[in-house]
Image (spheres, rainbow, N blue to C red):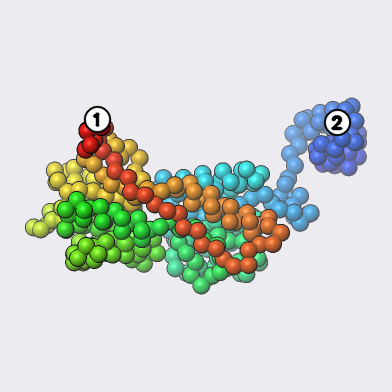
């Protein structure tokens, strides 16, 4: 700024007032300052300015587990929409599901003076997300509730959605349903498995452990597990995949084997109406997860009186049936 002032032959205060749009700066002086700014290609360092004044950095941190998954891309867009409306920007970090990398990303964002962080936790240990350990930095968790922390959280109705999808398969007459889960050690996976088993028990059906499989959220791995289930002497007549990537893998296995097994999945699947057979999908507004998390975080950052207690927001789900394009509707419509 001093260089701009010297180039324009004005004081640094005049430069500062010009860049703030202060009406006390005359049009002639403003033109001189802006010409100097253009000539020197000056750009204000807002981070340094925030450090000097103690003001907000205008940045929100977002730590997610898998940016290549459309779910997290939509979540990030939801966060960004709320942050942008508030005049803030989002810094995104991807952990790949690695807890140590999550710790490093959170520490790095905190050191860069973000105003708050939204985290999709990679594991059960959330001690590094304690706002007290981060010098009071506001933290909101998304998709998984906190463990040992008093922080706000936004989750999906994983139990209810899984229960509803399994009940729909049972209503179609299926009694042996293969489950391609996410792993019982992850809260999301455990809740979706719990909903699946609850629907079976409510229908008076046994829970067969041989049909319950934990699969990495990967289409290839899900396809291999589904192929193994469908090649059994007593194969399941339906498959329920606990996330969209596993649904794609399960569909590939069904198509490859020519099986007549029905398919249901959790999370919407792009182009599901191009599948050759109907599919039931547990769907919800993924962007709403991000939007609500960002709103909770901004209330902590900007509120004159932040909420005294942690808040839990649950995003509801619905069950949607996709039919192949051109297929007649059962009602004839």
Secondary structure at numbered mark 1? loop
Mark 1 highlights which residue?
326
- Which residue occupies 58% across, 61% down? 139
For mark 1, does the 10 Å Cα neighbourhood hold few (<14), some (14 to 19), or many (20 or more) residues? few
- Which residue occupies 25% across, 52% down? 168
- Which residue occupies 52% across, 46% down? 78
What quarter of the picture does the C terminus occupy?
Answer: top left
Q: Is residue 314 visible?
A: yes
Residue that sits furthest to the left in the current view:
233
Task: Say above or below: 37 vs 118.
Answer: above
Q: Is residue 113 left or right of residue 62?
A: right
Relative image position of residue 217 (x, y in whole percent) = 34, 54
Q: Nearer the viewer, residue 304 or 126?
A: 304
Relative image position of residue 212 (x, y in whole percent) = 23, 62
Relative image position of residue 103 (x, y in whole percent) = 53, 63
Task: Say above or below: 165 vs 28.
Answer: below
Secondary structure at numbered mark 2? helix
Q: Is residue 91 left or right of residue 94?
A: right
- Which residue occupies 29% across, 53% down? 165
Q: Is residue 120 left or right of residue 138?
A: left
Q: Which disc is residue 30 wearing? A: 2
For mark 2, does the 10 Å Cα neighbourhood hold few (<14), some (14 to 19), or many (20 or more) residues? many
Foreground tag (1 vs 2) = 1
Disc 1 to disc 2, how far (Cα)? Answer: 64 Å
Q: Nearer the viewer, residue 144 or 40?
A: 144
Q: Is residue 101 visible?
A: no
């Amino acid at each position: 700024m001093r260089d701009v002032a010297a180039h324009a032959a004005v004081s640094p205060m005049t430069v500062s007032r010009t860049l703030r749009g202060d009406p006390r700066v005359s049009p002639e002086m403003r033109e001189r300052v802006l010409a100097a700014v253009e000539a020197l290609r000056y750009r204000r360092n807002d981070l340094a300015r925030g450090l000097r004044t103690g003001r907000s950095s205008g940045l929100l941190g977002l730590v997610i587990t898998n940016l290549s998954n459309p779910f997290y891309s939509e979540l990030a867009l939801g966060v960004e929409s709320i942050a942008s409306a508030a005049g803030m920007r989002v810094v995104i970090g991807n952990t790949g599901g690695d807890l140590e990398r999550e710790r490093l990303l959170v520490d790095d964002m905190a050191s860069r003076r973000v105003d708050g962080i939204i985290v999709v936790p990679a594991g059960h240990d959330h001690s590094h997300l304690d706002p007290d350990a981060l010098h009071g930095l506001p933290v909101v968790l998304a998709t998984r509730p906190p463990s040992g922390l008093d922080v706000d959280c936004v989750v999906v109705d994983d139990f209810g959605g899984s229960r509803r999808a399994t009940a729909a398969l049972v209503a179609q007459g299926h009694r042996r349903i293969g489950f391609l889960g996410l792993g019982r050690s992850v809260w999301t996976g455990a809740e979706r498995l719990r909903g699946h088993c609850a629907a079976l028990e409510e229908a008076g059906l046994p829970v067969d452990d041989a049909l319950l499989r934990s699969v990495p959220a990967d289409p290839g791995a899900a396809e291999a597990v589904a192929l193994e289930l469908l090649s059994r002497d007593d194969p399941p007549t339906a498959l329920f995949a606990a996330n969209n990537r596993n649904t794609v893998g399960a569909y590939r296995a069904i198509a490859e084997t020519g099986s007549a097994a029905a398919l249901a999945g959790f999370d919407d699947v792009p182009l599901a109406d191009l599948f050759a057979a109907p599919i039931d999908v547990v769907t919800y507004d993924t962007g709403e997860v991000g939007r609500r998390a960002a709103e909770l975080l901004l209330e902590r950052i900007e509120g004159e009186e932040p909420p005294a207690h942690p808040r839990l927001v649950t995003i509801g789900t619905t069950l949607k049936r996709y039919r192949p394009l051109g297929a007649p509707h059962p009602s004839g419509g």
